[in-house]
């Protein structure tokens, strides 16, 4: 209830603040989600309340010219706008935080009861005069005039009280900010009711601005280069659509060979072109949203209408048949591959959708760039198999069921086995034996390889210690180390620690790496290799001849053994030219004083020929497949 000497400055400031907020809000791009609507509802409620308050102050000042009826309408409007702002804000809190089902029911009940109570009070007030009344044209507060305010506070308290878990998007810090804001508003309300200062509306507007800044600020969801929504927000949006069971068509539009455009025309032109593609997609006449998915990729999500999806795909495809123009260039032709995933048929959740998008785009780029492809027409079995394998790896690691088998390596000069290669093995109850060539790349992709690699090294060291290999002819065990492991900065120190833990000396371990080790962060790989080499561990170059066979790499890295890949060995027995190449390669490696292991030796003839042309060690099924530790020891003893 306002007093004649009410200070309107706070109300004017509040109104201006709110108008500024509306201008920002109107200027920014956003998805009309329920949370946004609830926040906007809160702001509109508060703005109307401020307007009603200003009118009310003027009415009080010029009371003699204002009828009781007009005065009552403004007062009722003020009560209703306060309540609606509180309800909207409470609803907003409920949407942006996690609330249990039971609490949702309680919350709905509280909203219903408070709305009905306030509405009834307003309707009955002319008769019962509980809120306010006029005594001889003088406005007087009723017995329950604070009740609407109290109800508003209760609604908000119940909203905060019902938060069971903070949603991922609202961090604890943000939640604290919300709660502090809430208490500032309560304090302002108390100051206002007690007649100290008329700052309640102003405090509410400051609260709205804080929420806008921390929770509704669109800049955190925008990609600054293209002006479209960013990937983080795309995840949030798609998750929301899956949560509310809304079907959708998801388009992935990936520019083909965009790095050549950047190289030929420069990054600025590249950015301008990306901006144009984003704007073009955003301007298409269909209900949907556009996101920047990757550096040269966009994702468009549209409401699902099957016939429309195909039309839109054709329209986008057709657009890429024509040139794109920037300020500084003539028409530039760009090609884009388009993949379409219909949800929920093709993908049931965000994780699956992203995997399908990545996989189908990789496949599309491999088979036919610049074309439209539908996930439903692709063979998605590989993705499903990869997922099942990933699960099997996770399970095996949790249950410590990753096994290591050993394949003996025969020394030509000694006429006996002198070492062995440790090969990881995995058997799943459902999938059976899974080849390492299949699960190692999956473990590398999702980072399991770090723990798995440590586990394998521990098992190897345990084997060396428990079977007392020092006393046997087996001088060392070859352990395969993935490039991903070598790129881990602590790899060398962890490996040393494991060896020390099992009393294994560095000369008992030989690390096998492939040429791909040079493709990642070379400085870390280099540091790890040099640290371990200094420690006394020797290195073998695995699969030589299957990749680039970079001589420079052999010269730079401290390798003592080169393992010739089985493919070049086998080819040399089929093809005369390959035979000559192999012979000269072996001669060169011998000249470089490197030791050579021939892989994939399957027959006696192969073994004899490879020994004749200068291979020092033989590994292959002619001798033995990889076997478990006990079988390996039996094999060694038998051959001794
Ligand atoms: P790789 O290091 O080149 O291992 C040699 C592969 O050739 C092994 O396959 C071995 O079983 C197979 N092999 C050996 N002799 C013959 C033969 O005479 N004939 C035929 N047909 N095959 C032979 P596997 O065990 O399936 O391993 C495949 C690849 O998986 C390995 O190739 C290696 O790159 C990777 N891998 C295996 N174990 C590990 C491990 O513990 N850690 C890491 N990071 N990778 C591993
Ligand atoms: Mg190997
Ligand atoms: Mg190999």
Image (cartoon, rainbow, N blue to C red):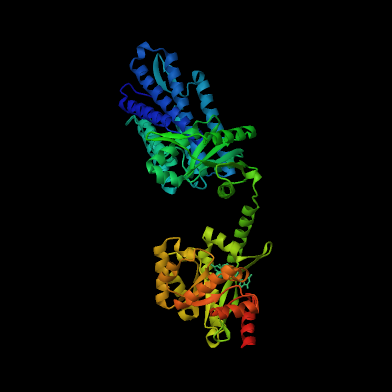
In the image, residue 437 above or below residue 637: above
Q: Could you say which is closer to the camera, residue 349 or residue 325? A: 325
Q: Exactly how many numbered labels are in the figure?
A: 0
Q: Quadrant of ligand 1?
A: bottom right
The residue under the point 61% across, 35% down is 310
**In the rendering, at what x and y percent does residue 104 appear?**
57, 40
Image quadrant of residue 206?
A: top left
The residue under the point 46% across, 31% down is 40
- The quadrant of the image that shows the N terminus is top left
Q: Could you say which is closer to the camera, residue 595 or residue 640? A: 595
- The quadrant of the image that shows the C terminus is bottom right
The residue under the point 47% across, 25% down is 80
**In the rendering, at what x and y percent does residue 418 appear?**
55, 83
In the image, residue 599 above or below residue 90: below
- Whether residue 7 appears in this view of the structure is no
**In the rendering, at what x and y percent does residue 188 appear?**
36, 34
**In the rendering, at what x and y percent does residue 434 appear?**
64, 64
In the image, residue 298 above or below residue 51: below
In the image, residue 571 above or below residue 96: below
- Whether residue 563 appears in this view of the structure is yes
Q: Could you say which is closer to the camera, residue 49 or residue 435? A: 435
Q: Could you say which is closer to the camera, residue 276 or residue 46? A: 276
């Amino acid at each position: 209830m306002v007093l004649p000497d009410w200070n309107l400055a706070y109300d004017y400031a509040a109104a201006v603040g709110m108008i500024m907020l509306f201008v920002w809000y109107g200027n920014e791009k956003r998805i009309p989600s329920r949370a946004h609507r609830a926040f906007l509802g809160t702001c509109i409620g508060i703005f109307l309340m401020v307007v009603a308050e200003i009118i009310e102050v003027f009415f009080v000042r010029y009371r003699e010219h204002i009828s009781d009826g007009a005065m009552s309408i403004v007062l009722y409007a003020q009560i209703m706008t306060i309540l609606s702002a509180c309800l909207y804000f409470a609803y907003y809190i409920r949407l942006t935080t996690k609330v249990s089902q039971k609490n949702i029911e309680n919350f709905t009940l509280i909203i219903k009861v408070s709305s009905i109570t306030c509405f009834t009070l307003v309707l009955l007030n002319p008769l019962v005069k509980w809120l306010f009344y006029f005594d001889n044209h003088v406005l007087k507060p009723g017995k329950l005039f604070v009740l609407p305010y109290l109800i508003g506070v209760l609604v908000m308290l119940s909203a905060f009280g019902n938060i069971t878990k903070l949603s991922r998007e609202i961090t604890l810090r943000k939640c604290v900010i919300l709660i502090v804001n809430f208490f500032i508003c309560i304090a302002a309300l108390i100051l206002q009711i007690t007649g100290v200062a008329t700052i309640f509306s102003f405090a509410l507007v400051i609260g709205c601005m804080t929420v806008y800044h921390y929770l509704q600020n669109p800049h955190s969801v925008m990609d600054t280069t293209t002006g479209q929504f960013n990937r983080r927000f795309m995840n949030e949006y798609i998750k929301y659509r899956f949560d509310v069971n809304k079907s959708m068509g998801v388009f992935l539009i990936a520019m083909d060979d965009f790095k050549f455009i950047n190289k030929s025309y420069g990054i600025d032109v590249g950015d301008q072109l990306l901006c144009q593609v984003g704007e073009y997609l955003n301007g298409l006449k269909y209900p949907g949203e556009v996101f920047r998915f990757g550096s040269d990729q966009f994702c468009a999500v549209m409401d699902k209408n099957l016939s429309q999806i195909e039309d839109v795909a054709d329209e986008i495809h057709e657009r890429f048949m024509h040139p794109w123009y920037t300020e500084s260039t003539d028409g530039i032709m760009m090609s884009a591959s388009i993949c379409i995933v219909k949800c929920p048929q093709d993908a049931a959740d965000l994780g699956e959708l992203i995997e399908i998008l990545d996989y189908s785009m990789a496949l599309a780029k491999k088979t036919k760039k610049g074309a439209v492809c539908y996930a439903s027409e692709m063979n998605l079995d590989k993705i499903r198999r990869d997922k099942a394998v990933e699960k099997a790896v996770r399970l095996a690691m949790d249950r410590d069921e990753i096994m290591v088998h050993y394949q003996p390596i025969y020394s030509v000069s000694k006429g006996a086995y002198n070492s062995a290669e440790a090969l990881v093995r995995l058997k799943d109850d459902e999938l059976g034996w899974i080849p390492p060539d299949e699960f190692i790349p999956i473990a590398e992709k999702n980072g399991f390889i770090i723990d798995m690699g440590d586990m394998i090294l521990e098992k190897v060291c345990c084997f060396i210690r428990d079977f007392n290999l020092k006393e046997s002819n087996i001088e060392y065990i070859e352990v395969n180390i993935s490039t991903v492991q070598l790129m881990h900065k602590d790899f060398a120190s962890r490996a040393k620690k494991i060896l020390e833990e099992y009393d294994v000396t560095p000369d008992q371990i030989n690390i096998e790496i492939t040429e791909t080790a040079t493709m990642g962060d070379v400085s870390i790989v280099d540091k790890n290799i040099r640290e371990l080499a200094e420690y006394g561990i020797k290195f073998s170059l695995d699969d030589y001849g299957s990749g680039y066979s970079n001589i420079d790499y052999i010269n730079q890295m401290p390798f003592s053994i080169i393992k010739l890949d089985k493919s070049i060995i086998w080819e040399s027995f089929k093809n005369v030219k390959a035979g000559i190449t192999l012979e000269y390669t072996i001669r060169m490696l011998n000249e470089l004083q490197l030791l050579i292991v021939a892989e994939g030796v399957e027959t006696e003839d192969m073994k004899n020929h490879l020994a004749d042309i200068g291979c020092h060690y033989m590994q292959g099924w002619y001798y033995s497949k990889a076997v478990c530790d006990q079988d390996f020891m039996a094999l060694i003893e038998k051959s001794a």
